[in-house]
Image (cartoon, rainbow, N blue to C red):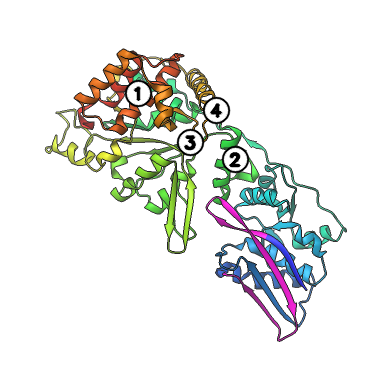
Amino acid sequence: MVARTYTVAFQGVEARPVEVQCAVTPGLPAFSVVGLPDKAVSEARDRVRSALSAMAIALPSKRITINLSPADLPKEGSHFDLPIALALLAALDIVPADAAETTLALGELSLDGSLVPVVGALPSAMTAAEEGRTLLCPKASSAEAAWVGATQVIGADTLAAVVRHYTGQAPLTPAIPGEVTQPDAQRDLRDVKGQERAKRALEIAAAGRHHLIMIGSPGSGKSMLAARLPGLLPPLTAVEALETSMIQSLCGLLDEGGISRTRPFREPHHTASMAAIVGGGKGAKPGEISLAHNGVLFMDEFPEFPRTVLETLRQPIETGEVMVARANAHVKYPCRFMLVAAANPCKCGHLADASRACSRAPICGEDYLGRISGPLMDRFDLRLEVPPVGFADLDLPASGDSSATVAARIATAREVQTTRFANHDGLRQNADAEGGVLEEVATPDTEGKQMLLNAADRFSLSARAYHRVLRVARTIADLDGSEQVRRPHVAEALGFRITARVMA
């Protein structure tokens, strides 16, 4: 007799179903796991044997074979412990075989039989719902998985509790979803003294999910401005929250099964490797660009990142997804993020101040910003020079709109975009529009179009830059409450595209 249960193997954010087969046959005593397991899966037999021994269950003196089907799919991770144990218990007639066959299980076993939480419970629950099965997992992971309401989720503390549940001795109650994580207190935009143009750029970038680069001397407030972005962005929609949480689940970042409606804000250090930023490493794990999906990726000291790391951003910025290709894994992750970069104008940081600039000015500025390639710079919708703040401005009282006021305008603009792109799959914000859709929604009036054509000719804008100006102008019009993109909207968009000499 072959007993069966089910689990998953992770490929990116996708959890592929795996059938766990167990056969107990006559022969020399042995316990083997086949089906392309990695080291952690192969070691499951020792953890399962010890957990069963802790329950006073002795394995028979027969040959036990565990097959993980499909056999050509690589199996990685310790979450195979529980399904292997469940299939073995069904083969030994300790739990009903039909109950095991209708279950999708995942969980790591301790030697004493307790269940250890594992990553990936949320995407596993999605697969269980698609397959019409019950999800069995450690209790610490059940609150996360219970957010998928289309399937029943059972959480257990120990393997003994699993046995009592399936034998009817002490049925376990279905898990309930974790709490919605409340956002931390956000920093207010009014804390930034001066820099009104920079605040306007932040508002436009947040409203349309446009990429932004800020270049200015040290202490001008670039990082301070970027830190206020989370307080300007609207909460994640239900679909976006699920997408983001599935990636966080794979990385074990969901706290006690709670799902946050706050948009991610990732700020990696400039010493981060390519695998840390783009994804990769053992098992091709998601990188910072995927963890920033539906949120913000803030890269301070942008030119200090390795050139190879910066160049790998070019394709994900355009496509909204990244393919992590390795010798034994080809995994696709979503990465629809807003890139906000900050940089000094040169190595010393005082290129614009002749009294403080180094002896190599202005060549040092060309060399320093030259680390950012032209094609990458062309992908920034908004380019902003952040001037230093005078000491007199620091003594002035807070001015300008608060973060709450600006966030309300941004939320209204995003609602307009949601309605606009409701019938277009894959389009959510103005930054996503392209081709015929962009021409339909962002074509300016006669005066605006003539201004854009003149600017494109005079400043030799690329086709990409031309379209990005249109998208920014469309966002400015949305913030202005205008259905038509007009000349002032185009003028402001061009002003953020063609600005400082340091970005020429």
Q: Quadrant of residue 464?
A: top left
| Quadrant that contains the N terminus | bottom right
Separation of marks 3 and 4 at Cα, in angstroms: 20 Å
By secondary structure, the bulk of the magenta-drawn segment is best described as strand
Q: Which of labels 1 and 4 is toward the front?
A: 4
Residue identified by numbered label 1: 198
Q: Secondary structure at mark 1?
A: helix
Q: Position of residue 7 (x, y in %)?
A: 66, 59
- Which comes sooner in the sequence, label 3 or label 4? 3
- Disc 4: CA contacts within 10 A as few (<14), some (14-19) or many (>=20): few
Residue 9 seen: yes
Q: Position of residue 314 (x, y in %)?
A: 34, 43
Residue identified by numbered label 2: 242
Query: In the image, what residue occupies the spot 46% across and 14% down?
Result: 481
313 over 238 or under it: above or below: below
Residue identified by numbered label 4: 422
- Which comes sooner in the sequence, label 2 or label 4? 2
Asked if the stretch drawn in magenta spans residue 31, the answer is yes
- Which comes sooner in the sequence, label 2 or label 3? 2
State the extent of the magenta-drawn residues as a range: 7-36
* 466, 122: nearer the viewer: 466
Q: Is residue 415 left or right of residue 304?
A: right
Separation of marks 1 and 4 at Cα, in angstroms: 31 Å
- Which comes sooner in the sequence, label 2 or label 1? 1
Q: Which of labels 1 and 3 is toward the front?
A: 3
- Amino acid type for the residue under numbered disc 4: Ala
Query: In the image, what residue occupies the spot 44% across and 23% down?
Result: 189
- Amino acid type for the residue under numbered disc 1: Ala
Query: In the image, what residue occupies the spot 30% across and 13% down?
Result: 447
Separation of marks 2 and 3 at Cα, in angstroms: 13 Å
Q: Is residue 376 left or right of residue 174?
A: left
Q: Which of labels 2 and 1 is toward the front?
A: 2
